[in-house]
Image: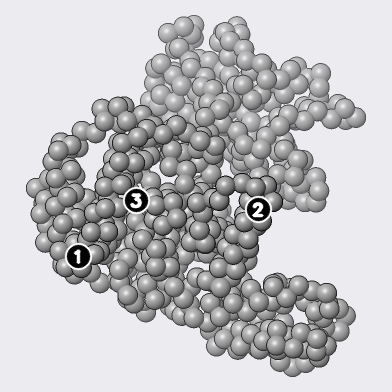
């Protein structure tokens, strides 16, 4: 809610939005102070201020609707039976917008850190840990924390957390259950996590084209020094329509990220850790050497650290990466301004396997280095604080020695990022995970075709017109799917794959693996769309990606020498209650003998 409202308000000149926010805040205050006054609950379109400062300003009308106003022929009315909690929430959000100090990114100064005196500059892995530990001093920057606190709608989130707590207490009392070890802090953390994920921060795989607003895809890393403003990592994304190159800077500075509020897991965890610190919680930035980051927050009620992944909006599910995403954990380090700790064992239920993969540093040397780094950082602290940190660390080390078993929610695949991005990283759900393995030595003419008939609901692997293998049922022959079903229309005698009813989007993918290098691939992927439905299909292998044209036909030599390819289709859009039916794969008559999906591989 706040993200959409803020985006709209920020499209206007700043002075114009400030006037609008001031007027809307006054309207809310009048109603909340005198809720039975009909004059305050009625706004006329003919009123000059209402027309010029609300209706003619981006975000103004949206704000009225969020407050609860209903549009009439002459103006807007707040019905007498309207719950004023929405009004209070919007007033709070408008206050947050005013305090957020929206500014041109060019005027924002990066966070300055004191110089670092390295202890382990001759050991690459330990030096990397040392550098990250030093950078995490930014989470203690008072000016930055103060600025971060202003963007959080603390009153709204606190009210929601209190309502959650009351509901839990009533449930416990009614059912005579034991008192749970949950606190207002824990529930407020859940509210912050949800708000951050759904309203504050935006996930970006590829930015919209700056020239035509069309979709783009990654092209290369920029070498243009003019792009390197507050960062030395700038991705270039090429528009699929006009070919224009749009830069996407990968910022790490927190002052900048509080302005841009977008990125991928690195930016998300960076800012979420800051906001948790701004709430006066002990928070840690957690870095997995296998390419992911998240946050930990210490729960005083539970007396332990809680895993929080803002990208996924999940809390206290530490085994999800190993069990659900299929990551081979090796080193996971947690960093705060006060301490650095090896927390790998919290994120694995296979400690012996993990130990066999840890080859970057001798275990004794690593433990000694972490102790030295912690001791050096804590030199200037008070004795009570040092004693608290030491005691807490001892309890944590005991906890990390015990292997946990996965619980509910820890076997789910990754949700953030598009289907192709998750597939290529191997972070999808466990089932079905079917792979078409093609033994080239068993082929008679160095070519093989995999095809699917939705009428017969069967896949076939064919070579020299001979069926080498068949798999019945659409879901048992694909690698990954989400919100997909097979639909048969009895009246029209048609059958196809479609989104599950009422779903907004769906994806499906097939993976093909070869025993010898590929020469070329040709593909036919038939699909139909209605209304505003869209089907986006791609083929990928390692760093090679190619979009499948709208006619569903493709011939490509781009994948030469590859040992696998993945074909993926994403289904979105449509209108009305049957929007899910407006994107269809492999539509054909129920008695058809054709194969609307086929992919042929030729080998060297």
Q: Residues within 10 Å of mark 2 (few under 14, many from 20)?
A: few
Residue 438 vs residue 296: left or right? Answer: right
Residue 453 visible here: yes
Comes first in the chain, label 2 or label 1: 2
On screen, residue 168 above or below 49: above
- Of 475 and 303, nearer the camera is 303
Dividing the picture into quarters, in which one does residue 563 lie? top left
Secondary structure category for the residue under label 3: strand
On screen, residue 551 above or below 271: above
Kindly report the distance in space between the C-alpha atoms of the residues bearing marks 2 and 3: 37 Å
Secondary structure category for the residue under label 1: helix
Q: Residue 412: image x %, image y %?
A: 53, 37
Q: Residues within 10 Å of mark 3 (few under 14, many from 20)?
A: many
Q: Quadrant of the C terminus?
A: top left
- Of 18 and 151, nearer the camera is 151
Q: Residue 271: image x %, image y %?
A: 41, 62
On screen, residue 14 above or below 470: below
Kindly report the distance in space between the C-alpha atoms of the residues bearing marks 2 and 1: 42 Å
Q: Which residue is mark 2?
A: 173
Give the residue displayed 71% in from the left and 20% down from the top: 457
- Of 561 and 287, nearer the camera is 287
Q: Nearer the viewer, mark 1 or mark 3?
A: 1
Q: Which residue is mark 1?
A: 383
Give the residue displayed 60% in from the left and 68% down from the top: 159
Q: Which residue is mark 3?
A: 286
Comes first in the chain, label 1 or label 3: 3
């Amino acid at each position: 809610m706040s993200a959409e409202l803020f985006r709209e308000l920020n499209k206007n000149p700043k002075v114009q939005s400030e006037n609008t926010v001031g007027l809307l805040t006054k309207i809310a205050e009048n109603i909340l102070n005198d809720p039975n006054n009909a004059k305050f609950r009625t706004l006329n379109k003919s009123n000059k201020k209402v027309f010029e400062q609300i209706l003619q300003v981006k975000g103004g009308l949206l704000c009225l609707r969020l407050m609860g106003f209903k549009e009439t022929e002459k103006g807007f009315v707040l019905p007498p039976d309207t719950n004023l909690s929405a009004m209070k929430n919007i007033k709070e959000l408008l206050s947050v917008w005013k305090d957020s100090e929206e500014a041109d990114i060019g005027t924002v100064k990066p966070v300055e850190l004191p110089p670092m005196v390295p202890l382990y500059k001759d050991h690459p892995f330990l030096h990397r840990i040392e550098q990250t530990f030093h950078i995490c001093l930014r989470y203690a920057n008072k000016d930055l924390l103060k600025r971060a606190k202003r963007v959080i709608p603390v009153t709204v989130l606190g009210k929601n957390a209190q309502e959650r707590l009351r509901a839990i207490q009533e449930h416990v009392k009614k059912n005579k259950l034991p008192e749970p070890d949950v606190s207002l802090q824990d529930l407020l953390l859940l509210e912050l996590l949800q708000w951050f994920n759904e309203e504050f921060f935006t996930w970006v795989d590829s930015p919209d084209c700056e020239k035509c607003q069309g979709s783009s895809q990654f092209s290369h890393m920029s070498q243009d020094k003019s792009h390197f403003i507050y960062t030395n990592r700038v991705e270039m994304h090429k528009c699929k329509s006009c070919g224009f190159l749009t830069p996407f800077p990968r910022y790490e500075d927190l002052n900048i990220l509080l302005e841009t509020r977008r990125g991928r897991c690195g930016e998300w965890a960076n800012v979420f850790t800051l906001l948790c610190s701004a709430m006066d919680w002990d928070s840690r930035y957690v870095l997995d050497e296998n390419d992911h980051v998240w946050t930990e927050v210490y729960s005083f009620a539970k007396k332990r650290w809680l895993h929080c992944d803002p990208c996924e909006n999940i809390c206290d599910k530490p085994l999800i990466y190993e069990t659900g995403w299929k990551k081979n954990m090796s080193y996971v380090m947690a960093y705060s301004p006060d301490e650095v700790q090896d927390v790998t064992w919290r994120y694995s239920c296979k400690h012996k396997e993990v130990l066999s993969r840890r080859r970057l540093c001798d275990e004794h040397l690593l433990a000694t280095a972490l102790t030295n780094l912690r001791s050096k950082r804590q030199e200037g602290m008070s004795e009570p604080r040092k004693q608290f940190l030491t005691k807490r660390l001892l309890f944590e080390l005991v906890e990390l020695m015990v292997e946990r078993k996965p619980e509910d929610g820890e076997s789910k695949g990754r949700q953030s990022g598009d289907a192709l991005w998750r597939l290529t990283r191997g972070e999808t759900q466990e089932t079905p995970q079917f792979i078409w393995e093609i033994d080239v030595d068993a082929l008679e003419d160095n070519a093989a075709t995999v095809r699917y008939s939705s009428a017969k609901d069967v896949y076939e692997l064919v070579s020299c017109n001979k069926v080498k293998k068949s798999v019945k049922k659409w879901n048992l022959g694909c690698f990954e799917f989400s919100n997909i079903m097979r639909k048969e229309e009895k009246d029209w005698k048609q059958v196809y794959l479609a989104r599950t009813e009422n779903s907004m989007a769906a994806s499906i993918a097939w993976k093909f693996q070869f025993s010898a290098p590929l020469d070329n691939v040709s593909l036919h992927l038939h699909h139909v769309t209605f209304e505003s439905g869209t089907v986006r299909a791609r083929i990928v292998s390692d760093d090679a990606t190619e979009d499948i044209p709208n006619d569903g036909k493709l011939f490509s030599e781009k994948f030469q020498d590859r040992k696998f390819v993945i074909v993926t289709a994403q289904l979105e859009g449509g209108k009305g209650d049957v929007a899910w039916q407006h994107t269809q794969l492999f539509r054909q008559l129920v008695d058809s003998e054709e194969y609307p999906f086929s992919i042929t591989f030729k080998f060297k």
